[in-house]
Amino acid sequence: MKVLLISANTLTTPYPVYPLGLDHVADAIRSRHEVRITDVNTLGETNALGHIIDGFSPDVVGMSLRNIDNTDQVNQRSFIDEYLDLAHTIRKCTPAPLILGGSGFTLFPEEMMTVLGAEYGIIGEGERLADLLGAMENNDPIIGIPGVVTQTGPKTIPPPLVNPGGRKHLRDSPHLQYYLKNGGMLNLQTKRGCPFKCIYCTYPHIEGRRLRLISPEAAAEDALRLQGAGAKYFFVTDSVFNSDAAHSIAVAEAFIQADIKIPWGAFFAPVDPPDGYFELMARAGLTHVEFGTESLCDAMLKSYGKPFRATHVFRAHKAAIDSGLYVSHFFLLGGPGEEGNSIDETLNRVEKLTRSVLFFFPALRIYPHTDLYDIAVAEGQISTAGNLLKPCFYESKQIPRNEILRRLKTHARKRANWVVGSGGANTANIVARLYERGHSGPLWEHLIR
Ligand code: B12
């Protein structure tokens, strides 16, 4: 079959993100089907998609829905209307069935099937498109294929694939060139899954709790592929890169062995690192450490279900800084139990995280399949009959959101390394201008004070 896969993501903050998921989907089906990937970021003229569809005549069209919104209560942005426009354009150009997938879709399959009126969707890993296409070709029953949903059938959450494997191809394409020109950043995955139990987080639902490791050699091969394609930087997209310290060490050693020369970054949990951990990472090319710290008040870390406490954060921070790495910390304020004192404790202790960038999100978005969802239902903040496609943010009973924001802004004043929210259109424009001038990578290191 001819399969057109479309990345629908137009968000360019904090920077344009290469649609890695579609490479994995394409890898899973390319031996039996003809696949083309198109990215809306590269569709300059109005009817460009029409021309692509006319020229290719796809038998099915897959739409990748990565972001539903920007999860930023301060500069809120939803992408549903854009997806609706895109789906209308596709429908005008071809009668081919529409198949939805992507992390955003996995969070809201029922809602997105209804809004976009697609024939099919795949919850979770899109490699299962191979099974759906096979059934379509053979006129076999669709209902019952793990992950595959239809308008009327059940929307059952599938078990994760046993062995996902790493990306195997990176074809030169207009969209690859777009990301190389706009920041030079590509990405790769070294494992799937997240074993942690953070109450607000969707990652275990999207990727499963059990870690499924990609071999360090395959990850290094993928990094070499990115390097060969001209990437100036890559991000390791694992939920938490050091959730399996031994595997992350083996990956770093494989990068050194493969002589990876480009810098990279990843998400880390600020837990006690093994001796020499960040030195090894730095030798393997790691330059940017993004710690999911969330709070510096132990009571809040406990409430969030985090697997570390503030003392661990300071030790992990020091280990990364001492290894010469750029360090950032992400904070989530206003969760269950947050009060004036816990906010002050976090904001005052943040000063100890020297030479870093601090990103603050002063509200937690409530997602289905999380403990925060159950807490919000029990507290009457949301109802199980409600629709969370339109973002709903948790409200602490002890401190109103505007008071959190006021305290945060008072502390953040004049500190260039304190960033509130993800930045709106203004940040996107600054980042775009820097990329035009030849800068590459995530760029937040320029804010370090
Ligand atoms: C890594 C990551 C980042 C990195 C990306 C770095 C980089 N250069 O790649 C950074 C930190 C930059 C980032 C930023 C943001 N992120 Co982010 N990110 C992730 C994360 C952890 C992994 C994404 C990933 O690459 N996975 C690996 C690939 C292989 O998987 P995948 O893309 O999901 O594809 C698989 C399936 O989804 C499916 N699939 C994908 N497409 C298709 C299409 C079809 C047709 C089919 C059938 C299947 C299919 O098959 C693929 C293979 O199995 C996810 C959470 C998660 N665990 O998934 C959040 C996530 C995607 N991010 C999210 C958000 C909100 C953001 C930001 C808006 C945050 C912000 N306010 O700044 C920005 C947006 C950036 C942008 N320009 O789009 C949300 C999106 C949900 C939502 N609320 O809309 C997620 C799901 C986290 C969450 N809160 O739940 N992110």
Image: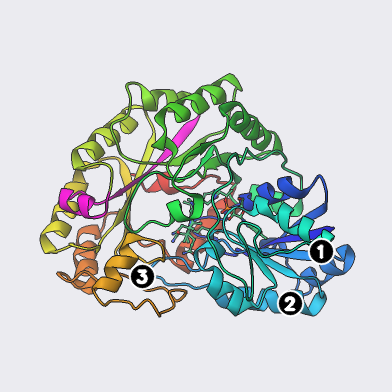
When the figure is inspected, residue 120 is found, relative to residue 206, above or below; the finding is below
Q: Picture coordinates of residue 144 (x, y %)?
A: 64, 61
Name the side, left or right, on which 236 lies relative to 436. Answer: left
From this viewpoint, is residue 449 visible? Answer: no
- Residue that protrudes farthest toward the left in the picture: 341
Say the numbered circle drawn on residue 139.
Answer: 1
When the figure is inspected, residue 256 is found, relative to residue 426, above or below; the finding is above
Q: Picture coordinates of residue 300 (x, y %)?
A: 20, 54
Asked if the stretch drawn in magenta spans residue 289, the answer is yes
When the figure is inspected, residue 441 is found, relative to residue 368, above or below; the finding is above
Circles 1 and 3 in contact, beta carbons < 8 Å = no
Colouring convention used in this rendered image of the protein: rainbow
Q: Which residues are magenta?
A: 285-305
Of labels 3 and 2, earlier in sequence is 3
Of labels 1 and 2, earlier in sequence is 2
Label 1 to label 3: alpha-carbon separation: 48 Å
Residue appearing at x 17%, y 71% in the figure:
397
Asked if the stretch drawn in magenta spans residue 287, the answer is yes
Say the numbered circle drawn on residue 74.
Answer: 3
Q: Quadrant of the N terminus?
A: bottom right
Which residue is label 2 attached to? 89
